[in-house]
Image: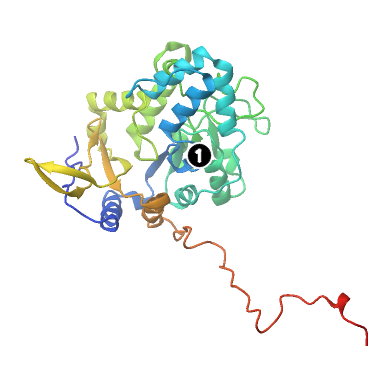
Amino acid sequence: MSPSLQPDSDSVVTPDELNTRCVDTLRAMGVAGGEYIAVVGAGPSSPIIPPGNRMVTDMANACKIDLPPQNTPFWEFFETAKTQNPREYCRFIESKFNNSPFWSSDAYELICKIRFKSIITTNYDHYLPRAFEKEEGAGWDERFCIYPPRTNPSSAKSGVATAINIEDRKYLIAIHGYRDASRADWPLDSIILAKSDYLLHYFRPEKSYYLHGWWREVLARFDCIFIGTSLLEPGIGDVLRELVNDGVIERKSRRHIHLVNAYPAARTVNGVQQPPAYPKPQILYDCVQQVLYDPKQSYVGLLEVLSNFSTSPVCTVFEPKMKAPSFPDFSTQPPFLDITWLPKI
């Protein structure tokens, strides 16, 4: 394990102090230098796409199956839904990702403005690609890749960017699938969510263990920062464990980061109740350093952290992008004058 990966103390701090500490830690670990790859989960889409627990509840209702026991891995539950009611499983996912309303995520826009070497997403919606297009401009779609791959009629090539591609150009890679309203079997055969999907693309020879090898290359060659993901998925976790056991992480001096939202919680020390404090950051898989931030209301805290590494200021509900309208002063001037009713002179 790298000596730089050490948990912080659990001292009592305010949300602003924690987020300042978060920014300082990210800077010290080199996030501002342009060499990190961002691995983005569904977290920034949570106002529109249901977060994990609610997604499970909504899926259980749609598929008319029982809620799983507590602590059941999400891939096990979605495998049950996919197997017992594949039609409703597909309909539910289509309703969440193919028919998503117009919405612009400041978090995604900030992520795309940060000097990341590339961006990988495990989510399926179009909000991050939309932000990537806005930031990158013409030719962005030539650097937007999807796995499982599909034919791109506008290009002579189709496939997924490799670690060699990422070395020289900034890509956006939807590595667990992407919304596709035109695909007849979507999402049944083209997203990675249920246990059988992980088994097929990571652990079985039918796909040549493709994603296992792909992530091994990326995680061994580049430093990564994970944003908006629990990092508990079986595929990536297995690769990280393997890289640590093989000594690759240590030889390459990799510095992986997991940006984690945290809230202060009550605690007891030697039977004595203590003031609420944030949990201690952990080191996952012996190689991924958690860095904590307080999300505050509506995840403004995340925007505050990301804005320190972006060219854009934070935009919140209290600081809208557009100029604030002013209430007209009707005592000095009427808002309009309708002359049609005036008597003729």
Residue annotated with mark 1:
172
* Residue in the picture at 47% in, 17% down: 65
Residue 169 appears in the picture as rendered: no
Q: Residues within 10 Å of mark 1 (few under 14, many from 20)?
A: many
**In the displayed structure, does residue 225 sit left or right of residue 87?**
left
Q: Where residue 337 sits in the image (x, y, percent)?
A: 79, 77
Tell me residue 231's x, y (percent).
Answer: 34, 32
Task: Tell me: 323 left or right of 243.
Answer: right
Q: Using the image as rendered, state which of residue 197 and residue 151 is in the foreground.
A: 197
In-front residue for pair 336/117: 336
Q: Is residue 84 left or right of residue 14?
A: right
**Quarter occupied by the C terminus:** bottom right
Q: Measuring 52% from the left and 61% from the top, which residue is drawn there? A: 320
Can residue 185 be seen in the rendering of this structure? Answer: yes
- Mark 1 belongs to which amino acid? Leu
Query: What is the quadrant of the N terminus in the image?
Result: top left
Number of marks in picture: 1
Query: Is residue 251 rendered to the left or right of residue 128?
Result: left
Reply above or below: 14 against 200. below
